[in-house]
Amino acid sequence: MTESESSAVAEPVVETVRRRKERQKDKPKRQPPYHVVLWDDDDHTYDYVIAMLMQLFGHPFEKSYQMACEMDLTGRVVVLTTTKEHAELKRDQIHGFGKDSQISRCKGSMWATIEPACGE
């Protein structure tokens, strides 16, 4: 291959790489995902947890029940993975859900936190 042929082949490749890099710069960057973690306690019933998960997260009964069981068994359960802003909103909604009327000693809502979902 002559030098002019080699140059003609290399130039389109370099131009293609440049265009690809420019397109990547224009793409919006994805936000890192966060988990909303619901923590177990003895002041809330399964009925309360299931109703809260169905109302706040739109989970069906079966999934809400499974999450309540996992939380009871392990002490915590991830109820949603989403953007940081949305995770903060859902955590705050859990904190504002109110007390469990079926347990007289219940003083308020359940506890939830958010954590980065990296490492999965």
Image (cartoon, rainbow, N blue to C red):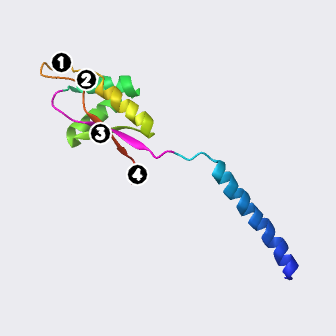
Q: Mark 1–mark 2 contact, CB under 8 Å?
A: yes
Q: Amino acid at mark 2?
A: Tyr
Q: Which residue is mark 4?
A: 118
**x then y, percent, for residue 33:** 44, 44
Does the stretch in magenta take in 35? yes
* Pair 4/3: label in front: 4
Spatial CA distance of label 2 from label 3 is 15 Å
**x then y, percent, for residue 81:** 41, 40
Q: Which residue is mark 2?
A: 48
**x then y, percent, for residue 93:** 35, 26
Does the stretch in magenta take in 109? no
For the point 30% across and 30% down, the residue is 65
Task: Say whether disc 1 or disc 3 marks the residue closer to the N-terminus.
Answer: 3
Q: Which residue is mark 3?
A: 77
For the point 15% across and 31% down, the residue is 42
Q: Which mark is residue 102?
A: 1
* Residue that protrudes farthest toward the left in the picture: 105
The residues colored magenta run: 31-43
